[in-house]
Every structure is written in C-alpha cells, then in structure tokens.
Image: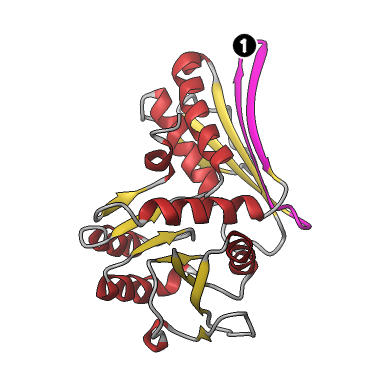
C-alpha cells in the first residue's frame, strides 16, 4: 500500500509516518502547510504532489478539505478523514465526494472508542429514560475545538439508544434550574498532555453506570488510520466509518 499523508508534519502525521515505516508501508509524499524535513517529500499543498498513491490519510485542519477531496477525485483514490470540526458546507463536500471515491470518516480512529460507541448505545436502550446521560471528555491544552468530535459521536449514539429525541447541553453555568429529562450533558476539560479520555455516565435512582475509554498514546489513532486505509483500498465509492470496518469483526 502506498500512502500520501496530509498533515504530515503534525503530531499525528509523524505518528502515522513512524508506524508506516515500522510496517513497511510506503509514504510516497506528505502535505503540510508548514513543511519540515521528513523521510519523504513534503509539499505545502496538493497541487504540487506528483507522486502516486493508493490512499490519502488526512490529519489536516478542516479548512482545506475541498483541496484534498478534489485531489483524491482527480486521482480516483480513497481518503481517510481523521479531522473534526467540519462545517455543514464541509460535510456536504465530503458527502458529494463519496459519490465518486471511497471516503472513510470518523471522529475517532481508535477501535476501543468505536466499541465504546456501540456499548453506550446499548446501555441507553437497556437503561431507558430512568437514567440521565452525561459525557465528559478530556484532552491536552493544545486542542482547539470543543467538545471533541468523539464526544459528539458518543452523544449521537446515546441519543439513538434513547430514541433520538434528546437535546445536547454543552456545559452548565449559573442558575440553570433543575436538569431536564431531555438533556444529554457534554463537558470538555483541557489540560496538560492528556491524549484523550471519554466517559459516559448514566445516572439513575440510587445507581450509576459509567463506561469510559482512555488513550495513553497517539499510536492507537495511527494504528486505526492504517487499518482504515488498508480496508478502504478495496472498497467502492461510498461513505464509510469504523462501524463498517468492524462489521465483520464484532
């Protein structure tokens, strides 16, 4: 498998590049707005990339997603999108591209987190409206968006488990009154070098059920990115996520 790595010089890009080197996966080129020396050529934009690849692994900011999608459509290759904080316009571009090429998009590439997503949905189905759901996510002090894409992904699964009629409340401050039954609380913590922690709490009458995941290294996301990229190279055009990849496993 040959890979073009978008966001190659960032923290996640370097982790993916290291794992590719260890696994014998060829990174033919990288793209980064601030190119720095890497074991492969790195360009400031996709227009300058001449190397061939089977797939793009993308850890770039959401702002330039159109460029990446146009490149992949022109080359007729798939793309693994690992970024978050996409606008509605960005999501529309991604959905449109998926009509032409295979697109893998997820808020979190960790297999453990995606298992957690399935578990919290089942928990909501079983526990029902007698339980209140609250989500807490913790990340390092350099993370720019809040709440995390993973927290929103988990909230969506919890909401589906409850029947889909819940309302998200992002943090609480001041005299907000008693908690409404329709709420799913989502709270963001930022500090230090926390890689990523997510906790979903179901609080009922005299009992609490808590499901959580903690990433101790960014390598878990690099592992997921490579696994997704390899799987995507054999898929037809369409929009995919980790549930599709894991469908034959879980």
Coloration of the structure image: secondary structure
Q: Which one is nearer the viewer's eye here, 31 or 120?
A: 31
Q: Which one is nearer the viewer's eye here, 66 or 232?
A: 232
Left or right: where 117 falls relative to 190: left
Whether 129 is drawn above or below 104: the answer is above
Whether 115 is drawn above or below 39: the answer is above
Residue appearing at x 33%, y 57% in the figure: 103
Q: Which one is nearer the viewer's eye here, 183 or 235?
A: 235
Q: Quadrant where the N terminus lies? A: bottom left
Residue marked by disc 1: 205
Q: Residues within 10 Å of mark 1 (few under 14, many from 20)?
A: few
Q: Which residues are magenta?
A: 191-214
* View extreme (front): residue: 24
Residue appearing at x 65%, y 67% in the figure: 11
Left or right: where 63 falls relative to 206: left
Residue 209 position in % (x across, y down): 63, 20
Indicate whether residue 207 is drawn in magenta. yes
* View extreme (bottom): residue: 48
Residue appearing at x 67%, y 10% in the figure: 206
Whether 45 is drawn above or below 169: the answer is below
């Amino acid at each position: 498998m040959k890979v073009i790595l978008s966001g190659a010089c960032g923290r996640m890009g370097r982790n993916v590049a290291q794992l590719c080197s260890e696994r014998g996966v060829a990174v033919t080129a990288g793209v980064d707005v601030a190119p720095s020396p890497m074991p492969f050529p790195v360009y400031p934009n996709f227009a300058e990339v001449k190397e061939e690849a089977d797939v793009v692994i993308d850890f770039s900011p959401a702002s330039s997603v159109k460029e990446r999608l146009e490149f992949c459509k022109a080359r007729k290759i798939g793309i693994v999108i690992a970024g978050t904080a996409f606008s509605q316009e960005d999501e529309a571009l991604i959905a449109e591209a998926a009509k032409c090429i295979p697109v893998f998009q997820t808020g979190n590439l960790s297999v453990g987190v995606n298992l957690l997503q399935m578990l919290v949905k089942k928990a909501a189905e079983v526990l029902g409206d007698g339980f209140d759901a609250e989500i807490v996510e913790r990340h390092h002090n350099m993370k720019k968006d809040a709440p995390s894409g993973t927290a929103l992904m988990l909230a969506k699964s919890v909401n589906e488990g409850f029947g889909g009629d819940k309302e998200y409340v992002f943090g609480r401050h001041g005299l907000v009154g008693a908690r409404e039954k329709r709420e799913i609380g989502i709270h963001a913590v930022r500090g230090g070098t926390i890689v990523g922690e997510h906790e979903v709490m179901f609080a009922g009458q005299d009992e609490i059920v808590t499901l959580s995941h903690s990433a101790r290294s960014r390598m878990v996301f690099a592992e997921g990115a490579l696994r997704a990229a390899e799987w995507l190279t054999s898929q037809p055009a369409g929009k995919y996520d980790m549930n599709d990849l894991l469908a034959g496993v879980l």
